[in-house]
Structure formats: structure tokens, C-alpha cells
Image (spheres, rainbow, N blue to C red):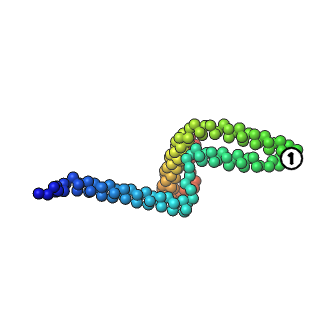
């Protein structure tokens, strides 16, 4: 009699599970590679994506500060020019010092404000488009009656 045991079903199930795990990993890896390739293509085509609202505000403050600091004031003349420029630099530095801690403490607030601004813009756009549609329908009605749509009759009684 031989000491060998027949192969069990457990060994076959483990092999199948290992193949499935490898397939799942391959799928995840391929999807991640495709996503990275798409991101790289978009960066090449459109440039780097915008950062968070807090980062964009920080960039705006830095750019405005840089422009104001380099601004020459012809109104103040040659004598007061350097002193005025020093005052502008000092004010810009104080403004940056006041804004920076707010940005650091509340970066999510700026994202929410940016999203709210986008929602307000969409609501305004919708209202304007609806009003334009009403105006254009009224113009069509006036044209059908033979009246001038550019003028509006106002009853003063």
C-alpha cells in the first residue's frame, strides 16, 4: 500500500482563489495605470489642474502682493515715491500675514465658498435665461400682432 493520499479538493480551491486574487490585482493595476496615463495626458494637454480653493487664494494673494510691491507711483513724484513704495510693501505684508493664518486654519471653508459661488452663478444664469425666454416669447407675440417689439407700452393711469 502506498502512503500517498489522493489530492484533496481544498488544494484545488486554494489554487483557484490564488488565480482570482491575481486576476483582481491585475485588474486593479491595469485600471490604476490607465488612470495615471489619462491624468498625464490631461496635464500635458491642459496644464496642471487647479488646486484647492485655499491654494488658489494663496496664489492670488501672492500675485497681487507681487504686483503691488513692484508698482511705481507716478502720482507721488520722485521724493515721496520710495517712501510710498515702502508703505505699500508694508501694507501688503500685513495683509498677507492676516490672510495666511485664516487659509491655514480653514482650507475646507474656501472649497465650500467656491462651490457655493458656483451654485450661485448657476442659479443666476438659470434666472437670466428664463427671463430672456420670456422676453423673446413676448417679442414674438408682439410681432404677430404687428407691433414693434423694441418699444413697450406703459400705462400711466
Give how far across and how far down residue 25 sits, in percent: 36, 56
Q: In terms of depth relative to the viewer, which is nearer, 76 or 127?
A: 76
Q: Is residue 107 above or below residue 24?
A: above
Q: In terms of depth relative to the viewer, which is nearer, 41 or 61?
A: 41
Q: Which residue is mark 1?
A: 77
Q: Residue at x 17, y 56 (%)?
A: 4
Q: Is residue 54 visible?
A: yes
Q: Is residue 120 visible?
A: no
Q: Is residue 96 above or below residue 26?
A: above
Q: Residue at x 48, y 61 (%)?
A: 37
Give how far across and how far down residue 148 sits, in percent: 55, 57
The quadrant the C terminus occupies is: top right
Q: Is residue 81 left or right of residue 125?
A: right
Give how far across and how far down residue 87 sits, in percent: 78, 40
Q: Quadrant of residue 45?
A: bottom right
Give how far across and how far down residue 1 sits, in percent: 11, 57
Amino acid at each position: 500500500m502506498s502512503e500517498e493520499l489522493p489530492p484533496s479538493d481544498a488544494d484545488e480551491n486554494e489554487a483557484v482563489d490564488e488565480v482570482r486574487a491575481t486576476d483582481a490585482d491585475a485588474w486593479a493595476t491595469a485600471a490604476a495605470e490607465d488612470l495615471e496615463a489619462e491624468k498625464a495626458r490631461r496635464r500635458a494637454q491642459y496644464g496642471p489642474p487647479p488646486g484647492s480653493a485655499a491654494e488658489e487664494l494663496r496664489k492670488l494673494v501672492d500675485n497681487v502682493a507681487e504686483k503691488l510691491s513692484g508698482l511705481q507711483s507716478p502720482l507721488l513724484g520722485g521724493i515721496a515715491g520710495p517712501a510710498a513704495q515702502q508703505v505699500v510693501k508694508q501694507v501688503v505684508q500685513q495683509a498677507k500675514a492676516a490672510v495666511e493664518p485664516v487659509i491655514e486654519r480653514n482650507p475646507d471653508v474656501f472649497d465650500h465658498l467656491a462651490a457655493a459661488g458656483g451654485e450661485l452663478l448657476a442659479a443666476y444664469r438659470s434666472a437670466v435665461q428664463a427671463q430672456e425666454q420670456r422676453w423673446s416669447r413676448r417679442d414674438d407675440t408682439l410681432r404677430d400682432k404687428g407691433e414693434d417689439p423694441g418699444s413697450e407700452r406703459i400705462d400711466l393711469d
